[in-house]
Every structure is written in C-alpha cells, then in structure tokens.
C-alpha cells in the first residue's frame, strides 16, 4: 500500500554571495492519512522551508515527493495549480499573511473563485458562511477587515481560507506561535476537531515543544537542515536519544515548580548553514563529540522499532547494547 | 553602600495610567499596588494588553506622552516618589538606579554604533570616568555576559540574536542598577539560547544583588526565575503571592484558567481547556469584575461590584469575590 505522503531525500539549497546555503539537506519521511507529523527545531533549522518545499511554494533543489502514490516532484504549471486543491498551508503570522485590503469574505472566497468551485453567488455565500461556522467565526464579521480583528480571530480566517477547497493535507507553519496562551488553546482544539471531522493530515511545524507533543503522532527533530531524530510523540518525550534533542527538551522552562530539573546547557549557538563542513552538524555544540563526528555524516538509523536517530555515538551516550 | 534596609525598596501605590486617544480613553493600568524587597525577583504575568509593559514604562516615567498619562499613584524607590521628580532628576535615575531590558534585542541597539561604545556610553553618562576607563569597564561587562572583550568594536549586525540580547543585558547592568526591569527578555530567542541567556541573567543578578521585575507571558520562565508573582488581567493585579502560593495554591479563576489552557510537557492531556471569549476592550472596561464575562465560577454578585483584593493568608492577595465571601464567612 502506498503512503499518503512520502518525501525522499528532499533538498533545498539557496545560492548566496557567501556560498550555497543548505536550508533542507536530504530529508526523507512519510506520513499516513489522518496523522500529524510534528516538525520541531530552532530558528534557521529549515523547518519552514521544508513545509513550503513540499507544497512547491519553493522549488526543491533535489529529491522526490509522492502524494497519494503519485510523483509530484516536478509538477508542470497545471499540475502545480491543481495540487493547491489538495494541499494547503496555514501561516505563522496572522497579521501579515492576510491581505489588509480584503474583507473576511473576500479572503475566504478567493480560493473558491480561483478554482471555480462554486456556481452561483448564492452558493459562494453559503460556502463562506459554512466555513466561518466551521472555524468558529461569528457571521457578523463577514464584512470586516483583518485589522479590526484580534490575533485569534485572524488565525481562524487563515484556517478557513486553507480549508476552503477541502484539502486533505495541510502544512501548519507555527499556527499558534503569535497567539496568547488562552487563545492558543482555542485554536489548537479547533485544529484537532477539524482533523477528526474532515480526516485531515497535518504537518505541524513549531518551535514550541509542549504544543508539538500535544498535537502530533510522530515528531521529527531538525537541526541545520537535517533530521536528527524521528519517533512517536510519546517515545520522543519519554526517552530522547540524540544529544541535541536531550538538550532541547531539558531547556524548556516548565511551570511545575515541584518537578526537579537537570538542564543541559549547550555551548555556543547554531552554526551557519552556508557550505556546512562535513560531519555531524551538531558536533561543534555537542558534549559527546568524538573525532568521527567532525569527519563523517551520521545517517538516520533505527535504534528501537520506530525510533530513528542520526548520531555516531548514540549507543554509547544512552548505554544501549 | 545601600542603606535604608528597613523601608521597602520599591513600593507602587494605586498606579493609574491611561492612554487618551481620539477614540476614547484606554485604561491600561488601573489602580495597581505592589511592593518589592531588595534582591527580590517579581514577575508580572499576563496576556497581550494586560498592562504589563505600560506598568514597566510607568516605573521609568517613560510612558509616551501624548497619548499616555500617569493619572494617579505613587512610585516610591527607597522612599522617594519618582513621579514627583523633575525630568532631569529622573534621567539620572534611568540607566543607573533603574534599567530596562527590552523584548526585542534586534531593535533596542543602535545599528551604527559599536556594541562597546554603546556600553561605555551608559557608564560615562552616570559616572565620572575617562574614556579609557569606561572602555575598560565596558570590556569587563562584555566578559561578564559571556562575550569575548575582543568584540568591543563589532556592530550589532555582526551578532546573533542571543548575543545581542547579552549586549543589552551588559548595557542594563553596566552601572550596577538597584532595579532591573526585563520586558520579555527571552521571548524572541530559541529555547536553547533562552536557557543560556536566562542562566547568565540569573548568575549576574545573584552576583550584583540586583532586584528584578520580570515581565513575561511564559509561565515556565516565571517558575524558574521568580520569588513572587503578580498576575495581571485588564490592567489590574488579580492575584499576587509567592511563587509557591500562586503556582501551587492557585486561587483566582483567571490564573487557574491560564494554567489549564497551557499544554503541559509533563502530562498527557487529550484536550486543552481554553478560556472562552476575549480580554475586555481596555477602552470600555466594565464597572464590575473585568474577568466576569469569561469566568467559569461567576456569580450573580460579581456583576454588581468590582471586587477588592483580599489577603487569603500570608500575603497571598486575590481580587475575586469568591474569596471575599469565604473570608467573611470565616470571620
């Protein structure tokens, strides 16, 4: 049986004045229908580029993408256009991703018009109302402009727009990062409800580890364009194996003051993704780095069933035999 | 050096700050009072628009005027009312006695001046030292926040976000202030960098015995840094207490709701409990409890009166009728 979405060795490079920037460097994964794949990592690790490259919002440098068993790695213009009906994106910033000169109704109906998805004005009205109802936007906002609404409502417009063409796959790029916690919970619940109702498949990109744990089935941890660890959500938080994941998890400030914590402080900062030297990208900051780490690229290896890690020393670090 | 230990170090009494705009009066800070001891870290927690930043700007007398105006209240630093001071006197206090770290390190540094000069500028403004001495002190300060002194002559764009925030911290701590106000100091940073920066701030605060007013929306950061916590909602402090009182013996329905709406990394919750509705419009606040419309435990009486803060034990203050009645029934 073919996977719902399969990505093989996807690469996205940018040419800059200082050399080639490896934004996404050989990422492979697959997602089953109805599942949520969480992608976590710090700024500049290539998680947003990954999402946008899968949707062909950016042209991949290399690699293969299969959607419902069909090769969509190099779509022609028409194919690319048609794909929009099945694959959509929710952007991070509900302030800049909506056209300030369009009303809520215009924003939500734009995709419907582009794809001639409705036959009459009445039908358009009905679809827009239905979508607004689905995402919990009151009918009275239909003719308001985005600037009149708060962040939570604006993000709902973005979600309604993404849902307009009834896609089966949505890339959610930090959909709740710009929102306050009380509103964040509303939007996260909404997204989970919609997934259950409409059988949606999500890629959920975020830097917030507690959010990704809450919403994902599987999680990939990215560092400088490569996946360093991939496993189930439960598995990752119960027993992270990669030294970067360990440090990342230990760095989250948590609000339970009675849980003792041991923080692993990392040395230095994320290095440049331009012309990265051979070897493990994380080696410079790693507390366990050996000589091999600076010369040989580690590959993702299955350490436990369904738990893959890209680290030369994973067995020594975690005392696995 | 630092005398007057008996009086409270910082005391804010009935502070009211409004923004008077063409579209009406925005009541940003409504009658808040709190006290801080020397060396203490107090966190102001709340969501966007709760009035946290306005409160901080009020302490420095930096509320943009117009449209902002401090309507009423007293801010006593070592017993002296800052609001009664002349602009000149206030200028001497800002940067030496009270300093502030702003949220966004990208915009709070001067892009066309080297970071070293930006640090020595503060030192020379507030101390009688020569250029060379100030430069030396600035180098020491850079080393203290974990930046090699060789980078004195570099410009802000040559630094990463975490390093820039370290420079901002160095500027803020250069004159050994008594009170450091940090407005979301790590919100713009990645978690591993946030951990490093918080760690540096924590070390320096201990070393210099600085008091800190921490403004944040991140309850995790609060849990790791604070002695006391004040939860703000619609311009008011709705709950105040020690970290343990507020986090483990949560009283106010808003504070409780905040905790419930947070996905917890240590627990498996299938569904979050959001707070219904939105924060009230600060230009038309109700004359009863401002959390009434979103409150799960609201009662008939809540709509009749604006509750007063009551002490529910050991200085734990809660601004909610639920506890007013509880207390009166006890007495």
Image: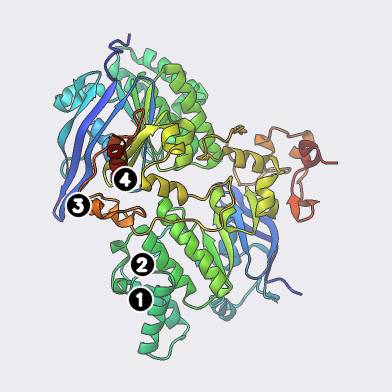
Foreground label between 1 and 4: 4
Which chain letter goes with mark 1?
A: A
x and y percent of residue B131 in the render? 35, 15
Per the image, the residue denoted by label 1 is A106
Q: Residue at x 62, y 69 (%)?
A: A34
Q: How many marks?
A: 4
Q: Residue at x 37, y 16 (%)?
A: B134
Mark number for residue A99?
Answer: 2
Q: Which numbered disc, 1 or 2, marks the residue that appears first in the sequence?
A: 2
Foreground label between 2 and 4: 4
Q: Are marks 1 and 2 in contact (CB under 8 Å)?
A: yes
Q: Is residue A297 above or below residue A168?
A: above
Marks 3 and 2 sit apart, C-alpha to C-alpha, by 43 Å
Per the image, the residue denoted by label 3 is B304
Marks 2 and 4 sit apart, C-alpha to C-alpha, by 45 Å
Q: Is residue B77 left or right of A38 when viewed as pictured?
A: left
Foreground label between 3 and 2: 3
């Amino acid at each position: 049986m073919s996977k719902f979405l399969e990505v093989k060795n996807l690469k996205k490079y940018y040419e800059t004045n200082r050399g080639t920037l490896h934004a996404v460097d050989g990422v492979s994964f697959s997602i089953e229908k109805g599942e949520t794949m969480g992608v976590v990592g710090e700024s500049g690790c290539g998680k947003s580029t990954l999402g946008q490259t899968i949707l062909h919002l950016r042209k991949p440098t290399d690699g293969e993408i299969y959607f419902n068993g069909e090769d969509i790695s190099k779509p022609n213009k028409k194919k690319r256009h048609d794909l929009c009906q099945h694959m959509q994106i929710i952007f991070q910033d509900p302030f800049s991703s909506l056209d300030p000169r369009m009303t809520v109704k215009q924003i939500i109906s734009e995709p419907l018009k582009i794809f001639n998805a409705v036959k009459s004005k009445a039908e358009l009205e009905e679809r827009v109302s239905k979508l607004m109802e689905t995402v919990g936007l009151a009918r009275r906002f239909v003719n308001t402009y985005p600037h009149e609404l708060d962040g939570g409502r604006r993000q709902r417009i973005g979600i309604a727009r993404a849902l307009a063409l009834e896609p089966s796959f949505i890339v959610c790029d930090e959909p709740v990062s710009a929102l306050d916690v009380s509103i964040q919970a509303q939007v996260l619940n909404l997204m989970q409800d919609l997934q259950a109702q409409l059988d949606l498949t999500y890629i959920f990109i975020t830097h917030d580890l507690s959010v990704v744990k809450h919403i994902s089935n599987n999680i990939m941890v990215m560092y400088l364009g490569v996946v360093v660890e991939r496993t189930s959500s439960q598995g990752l938080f119960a027993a992270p194996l990669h030294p970067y994941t360990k440090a990342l998890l230990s760095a989250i400030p948590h609000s339970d003051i009675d849980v003792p914590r041991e923080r692993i402080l990392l040395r230095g900062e994320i290095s440049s993704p331009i012309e990265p030297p051979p070897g493990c990208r994380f080696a410079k900051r790693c507390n366990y780095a050996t000589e091999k780490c600076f010369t040989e690229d580690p590959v993702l290896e299955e350490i436990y069933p369904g738990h893959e890690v890209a680290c030369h020393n994973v067995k020594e670090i975690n005392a696995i035999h | 050096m630092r005398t007057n230990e008996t009086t409270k170090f910082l005391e804010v009494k009935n502070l009211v700050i409004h923004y008077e705009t063409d579209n009406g009066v925005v009541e940003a800070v409504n009658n808040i009072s709190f006290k801080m001891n020397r060396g203490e870290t107090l966190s102001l927690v709340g969501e966007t628009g709760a009035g946290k930043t306005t409160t901080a700007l009020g302490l420095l007398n930096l509320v943009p005027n117009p449209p902002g105006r401090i309507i009423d209240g007293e801010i006593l630093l070592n017993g002296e009312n800052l609001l009664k001071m002349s602009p000149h006197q206030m200028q001497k206090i800002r940067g030496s006695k009270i300093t502030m770290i702003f949220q966004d390190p990208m915009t709070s540094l001067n892009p066309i001046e080297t970071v070293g000069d930006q640090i020595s500028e503060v030192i020379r403004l507030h101390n009688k030292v020569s250029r060379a001495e100030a430069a030396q002190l600035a180098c020491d300060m850079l080393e203290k926040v974990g930046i090699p002194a060789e980078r004195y002559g570099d410009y802000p764009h040559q630094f990463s976000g975490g390093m820039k925030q370290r420079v901002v911290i160095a500027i803020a701590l250069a004159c050994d202030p008594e009170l450091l106000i940090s407005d979301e100091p790590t919100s713009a940073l990645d978690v591993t960098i946030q951990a490093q920066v918080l760690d540096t701030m924590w070390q320096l605060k201990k070393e210099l015995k600085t008091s800190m007013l921490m403004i944040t929306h991140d309850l995790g950061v609060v849990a790791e840094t604070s002695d006391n916590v004040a939860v703000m909602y619609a311009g008011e402090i709705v709950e105040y207490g020690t970290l343990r009182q507020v986090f483990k013996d949560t009283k106010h329905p808003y504070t409780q709701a905040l905790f419930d709406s947070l996905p917890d990394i240590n627990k498996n919750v299938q569904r979050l409990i959001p707070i219904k509705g939105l924060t009230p419009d600060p230009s038309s606040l109700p004359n009863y409890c401002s959390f009434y419309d979103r409150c799960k435990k609201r009662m008939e009486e809540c709509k009749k009166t604006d509750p007063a803060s009551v002490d529910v034990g050991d200085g734990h203050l809660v601004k909610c009728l639920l506890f007013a009645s509880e207390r009166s029934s006890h007495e």
